[in-house]
Each structure stands twice: as structure tokens, then as C-alpha cells.
Amino acid sequence: QVQLVESGGTLVQPGGSLRLSCAASGFTLDYYAIGWFRQAPGKEREGVSCISSSDGSTYYADSVKGRFTISRDNAKNMVYLQMNSLKPEDTAVYYCAAGALFRLCVAHYSGMDYWGKGTLVTVSS
């Protein structure tokens, strides 16, 4: 059974840091582009970051560029999102997703094939 499970979401103060993890089971992440997406209350799901399966290319939304870092450990079948300098507007449910093509991950969340159930990140004082 294909499964993605996110963890690491919690309440954090503005300016703080968090690392989200995404564990895959039932399939091998090596051949998939992986993306992190988020959805805030009342808003559409949006792309945060993507990492390719082949050469490690990465993409970041302008809103997180320079603050977030995506990485993958294929040996552990894990993907991570390091989030620094967090802002209240980063508050959202964060999802990891796997898809066949990096360009589809960058283009829109509908291009992804497998999804986790999400983990809540709340940035508030």
C-alpha cells in the first residue's frame, strides 16, 4: 500500500524553525519528484517546494525562498522540509506529495500522484 506520512508540525513562535519529515512506504521515492504543499484556512492549496528525482534540482515558491530548504534521503525513503525564520503567514497544513515529473510538481499540485494527510504548522506568539 502506497503511503506518505508527514510529521513535525507544531506550534512555533515567529522567527522560529521547524523541520518537517515525510516518510514513504509501499513504494520507492528514488524515482519520484517530491513536493511540499500547504493549505491555509480558506485558501487554495499552494506549492511550497519541489525536489527532482534525477539531479536534485529544487524549486521554491517566492514566499519561502531563502527560508525553507527541501532535501531527500533516498536510502531512508524520506523527504524533509527545513523551515527557518517562520512567519505567521506560514501557518497552514503542510502536505508532502510524490509525482512522476518535477515540472508538474512545480506547475501545480494537481500534477502529483500520491499524497500524505498533512501536518499542521502554526506560527504564532
Image: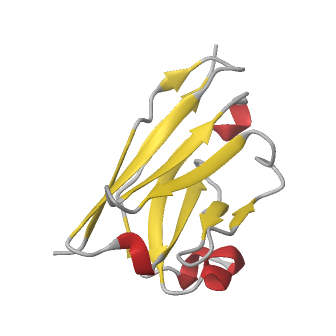
Of all residues shown, which one is farthest toward the top? Answer: 125
Q: Is residue 62 above or below residue 97?
A: above
Q: Position of residue 108 (x, y in %)?
A: 65, 78
Q: Quadrant of residue 76?
A: bottom left
Q: Is residue 49 visible?
A: yes
Q: Is residue 18 left or right of residue 88?
A: left
Q: Is residue 44 visible?
A: no
What residue sits 68% from the left and 43% below the top?
Answer: 68
What residue sits 31% from the left and 74% below the top?
Answer: 28
Q: Is residue 43 left or right of residue 94?
A: right
Asked whether 109 or 103 is in front, the reply is 103
How many labels sit on residues? Answer: 0
Q: Quadrant of residue 48?
A: bottom right
Q: Position of residue 1 (x, y in %)?
A: 15, 75
Q: Quadrant of residue 21?
A: top left
What residue sits 23% from the left and 74% below the top?
Answer: 2
Q: Position of residue 61 (x, y in %)?
A: 77, 58
